[in-house]
Image (cartoon, rainbow, N blue to C red):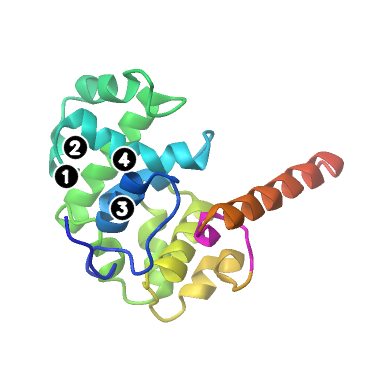
Amino acid sequence: MAAADFTEGGSAMGLNLSQIAEADALLDDDPLALLIGMVLDQQIPLERAFAAPYELTRRLGRPLDAHALATADPDALAEVFTRQPALHRFPGSMARRVQQLARLLVDKYDGQAADVWRTAADGRDLFRRVAELPGFGVQKAKIFVALLGKQCDVTPDGWRAAAGPFGEDGVFRSVADITDQATRDRVRDYKKQLKLAAKLNPV
């Protein structure tokens, strides 16, 4: 699959989230792979989450396709996710979530993942669209808007405001700020500091 501007379906900069060249190339070229990686990015290392779409294509034996995932037999898809090494700590529930994501993409965007952002009117609309995707809460939606803006050249008016603190320049708060191993380590340090502060100052 040839790389292209991400507003048309390819990353502008070259993502470096999985630390595996082939897996990152897929994230660059396939908006659906990037969405799936973002869905899986919880309760497992981020590298594992963003490498999973590439492994999923290997197990399926074909490129990712929202229509095919939406209509797949749920038990068969769960088996693909559960096959060792499992694609997630909770492979069954994540298989269901990915299928829910695919079904929404088919219902609302004709299966075209990039249309979630390509046809957004502005940053607020982009955030609303991302936040309604299965597996995307408010914070994850803000992070994804920031990732699109900072690394994928998806910058509708108001995208930084929609991304909240994750859209600020010069910060290392989320996957939106990871471009290499050094920035990944800085993001991890930031998250460790948040956890420590929460432990020292429980609500």
Q: State how far apart marks 4 and 3 are (Cα).
A: 11 Å
What residue sits right under mark 4 in the picture? 53
Residue 4 point in image, percent of width and height = 23, 67
Pick the quarter of the image with the N terminus: bottom left
Q: Is residue 135 visible?
A: no
Q: Tell me which label, 1 or 3, sits earlier in the chain.
A: 3
Please indicate whether residue 202 sits to the left or right of residue 155 in the image.
right
Q: Are marks 4 and 1 in contact (CB under 8 Å)?
A: no
Residue 156 point in image, percent of width and height = 38, 78
What residue sits right under mark 2 in the picture? 69
Which mark, by number, is residue 65?
1
Give the amino acid at mark 1: Asp
Mark 3 nearby-residue class (10 Å; few <14, some 14–19, many ≥20): many
Considering depth in this image, is 94 or 170 the residue closer to the camera? 170
Q: Tell me which label, 2 or 3, sits earlier in the chain.
A: 3
- Tell me the residue at 15%/32% (across/down): 61
